[in-house]
Image: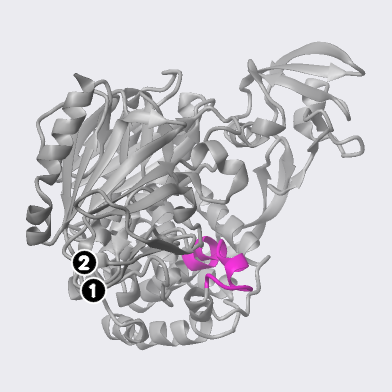
Amino acid sequence: MKQFICTLALALSFGSIAVAQKNNDVKVAINLKEVKDDKVMVTIIPPAVDTETTTFYIPKIVPGTYSEDNYGKFLENFKALDKKGKELTVTKLDDNSWKIANAKKLAKITYLVNDTYDVEGTHEIFSPAGTNILANENFVINTHGFIGYFDAKSEVSYEVTITHPAALWGATSLVDTNASNEIDVFTSPRYADLVDHPIMYSKPDYTTFTVDGMEILIAVYSPTGAIKAQDITPQMEIMMRAQKKFLGPINSTKKYSVLLYLSNGQLTDAHGYGALEHTTSTTVTMPEALPVDQLIEQLKDVVSHEFFHIVTPLSVHSKEIHNFNYNTPKMSEHLWMYEGVTEYFANLFQVNQGLITEDEFYSRIADKIKQSKQFDETMNFTNMSKNILKEPYKDAYYNVYLKGALIAMCIDIQMRELSNGQKGILELMQALSKEYGSNKPFNDEDLFAKITTLSYPEVGEFLKKYVAGSTPIPYDDYFAKMGVTKSTVKKTGNPFLKDGQIPYITVNPSKEILILPDAPLNDFMTNLGLKNSDVFVSVNGTAYNFDNIYDLIAISDTWKEGDAITMKIKRDGKEMDIKGKVKLPSEEAEGFHATDASKTKLKEAWLKG
């Protein structure tokens, strides 16, 4: 019966070869019911081909990652067949492209797809941009890892039929046009739209709510069932309502999906934690070991950043983004805007809507300034963005979340000062969104002039000098415009990392985690009576070693002063149990405080306006 249903699905989906060619679309079938050796079969019927050869591509790079990941490496047993089932000659040109001879006879192609999660130790694909194949349990379908495009055919429409176990449900912002509980059919007007819509199959665990006409879907996969969608929804709803209130009428997205995959933290599962934005959704990977309250705190920052991408690059983007080439991309000059403005909004809205305090906001900005100064402050940011796939610019990519956000902050401050608090960068992005919108990309070289027209000449000068130029930004001068000055502040540190970077711990040849033999013990360690060379066997009931050391650090970053903690350690070969309270280490750092009362009204317009 299962085989019959699968065969029927393919027949209903594809019909005859002639129909597919007449409609000139791409028809795709993915069979999730038959998983062999952790691989699934993909079948593709192409549109009509009128050339002697054609080339099929799987993306080398996808938007939002800015790295060459070569998803074609995960394809096997690639075949091109005519309508009689005879194989056509295929030449593999590189990791991501296959040249097909006698292409006018091409009826379909087939290949197997392996996933990226269980082999993460062999590549650098960021988990939220990767794929998962876990038979009858979970499938993370970032479509760029399963489906490709034909040469000169990326603008044709796609029809994707996914056959799946009845117990699994596909969470996505795509619309399923098939009523069967084992067959989903999705359509997209072009390849870029298809790639922009991830799907996660798992046993149904989701919630929905509506915010100002936008339907929000929260879907969760938790391997042990420890975390439910309902556990995180109340705080996610508060956050997303605050975001929508902050943004105002800046977008027309009708549905937004948060696809949360929780990893068991082992080497055979995802361990690249974070998120990847899409136009109407975000894929998120986090460790399941995080207590739910700490998971929520992590999600606030991660999901809020991705959600703000509905402003840019959704509503405001260049032709390089709109017509993105997945295998030979031309990168845009304006990562400072796509990632920087987004990251700035993800922090500004929280103080604007009362989710964090003013001092917490300053602390976050101070951290960004400190981290950003570890990069070359004279690097031309537009040139870096345009060449982000090459060295030395590639190694500076993380700075788009740091200096990019600081650039946005300085523009915001400049506009607030010049408008006496009436306008800031949010109003600028609203104006740019009205000027362009999702279907009208701008020319890279025209953006600065347009921003100047919509704002002030001083903003244009700032962009030329500090973004397209090589002059370091004088952050103190911009803070002073709002009556805020630099000061020394005390902040809590991580129990295992000094200044968030220098480790207090290491790993021995047995893969055990231990305190460095000669490291100075911080307050967290002395408070619990820990000593140099103590080996951590488990913390709060979870065993840790080299395989999941990053989980330990991630979890420790969410501990609060006074939290109860239990540990099992080994000291001189003997196991010991330790119980106590968390005492977070205290560190002095550069920070900012409001000191000029005459600027209070302007400062309030900046942070609360």
**Residue 540 drawn at (x, y percent):** 64, 18
Is residue 238 shown to the viewer in this render?
yes
Tell me the kind of residue under disc 2: Lys
Residue 347 part of the magenta segment: no
Which residue is identified by label 1? Answer: 51
Q: For the point 41% across and 18% down, which residue is it?
A: 225
Q: Is residue 294 above or below residue 151?
A: above
Find disc 2 in the rendering and name its residue.
104
Q: Is residue 391 left or right of residue 461?
A: right
Query: Residue 607 location, x and y as percent?
Result: 39, 58
Q: Under tag 1, what secondary structure?
A: loop
Q: Marks 1 and 2: in contact by CB < 8 Å?
A: yes
In the image, residue 355 above or below residue 570: below
Question: Residue 542: x percent and y percent?
Answer: 63, 19
Quadrant position of the N terminus in the picture: top left
Pick the residue in front: 70 or 286: 70
Picture coordinates of residue 310 (x, y %)? 28, 57
Front residue (pair 262, 504)? 262
Tell whether 466 sits left or right of 53: right
- Boundaries of the magenta span: 388-405
Q: Quadrant of residue 574?
A: top right
Assess disc 1: are there few (<14), some (14-19) or many (≥20) residues with their C-alpha within 10 Å of its C-alpha: few
Q: Which quarter of the picture shows residue 140?
A: top left
Give the residue drawn at x 48%, y 38%.
Answer: 298
